[in-house]
Amino acid sequence: MLKLTRWSEEFEPSAEDAYLSHNSCLLAEYKILSETEKSILILHTVENYTFVEISNILEIRTPTVRKKFERIKIKLIEKNEDKKDRRYLNEQKIEI
């Protein structure tokens, strides 16, 4: 694994950084999420934790985790749709 040196200390990139470095197309979308949303997304989609397990880890209610995950999906879909719309408008030479 890649080890980075900073301030005379060695450390390894976080799991999130390692995952995103291989999936850089997700980086812009990932930045719009809150820390809690990022945690839920990574724990559920990458680490395959259940909503119950995530609720125990983050110390929030299970229905709240489920609802937040639904909202994360909507937020990411809307961000992706916005990019598609902008691309289409740029191709048509229509200013936003």
Image (cartoon, helix red, strand yellow):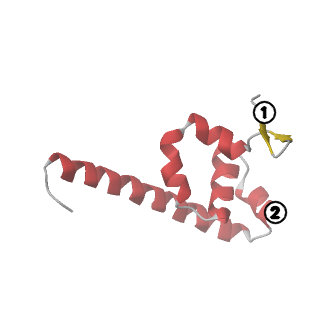
Looking at the rendering, in which quadrant would you find the N terminus? top right
Q: Which residue is mark 2?
A: 56
Q: Position of residue 25 (x, y in %)?
A: 48, 41
Element at label 1: loop
| Dot 1 amino acid type | Lys
For this orientation, the residue located farthest to the right is 9
Q: Position of residue 74 (x, y in %)?
A: 46, 61
Q: Can residue 47 be seen here?
A: no
Q: In the rendering, which numbered label is found on residue 3?
A: 1
Image vertical order of residue 2 relative to residue 35, above or below? above
Image vertical order of residue 4 relative to residue 30, above or below? above
For this orientation, the residue located farthest to the front is 7
Q: Left of 71 or right of it: where is 3?
A: right
Q: In the rendering, which numbered label is found on residue 71?
A: none
Image vertical order of residue 74 relative to residue 47, above or below? below
Q: Can residue 34 be seen here?
A: yes
Q: What residue appears at the point 72 percent right and 67 percent down from the top-left corner?
A: 62
| Dot 2 amino acid type | Asn
Q: Position of residue 56 (x, y in %)?
A: 81, 63
Q: Compute the Cα span from label 1 to label 2.
A: 31 Å
Quarter of the image where one finds residue 70: bottom right
Looking at the rendering, in which quadrant would you find the C terminus? bottom left
Foreground mark, 1 or 2? 1
Q: For the residue carrying disc 2, how many other residues have a C-alpha within 10 Å: few (<14), some (14-19), or many (20+)? A: few
Image vertical order of residue 10 relative to residue 49, above or below? above
Q: Left of 77 or right of it: where is 15?
A: right
Q: Upstream in the sequence, badge 1 or badge 2? A: 1
Quarter of the image where one finds residue 39: bottom right
Q: Position of residue 26 (x, y in %)?
A: 51, 45
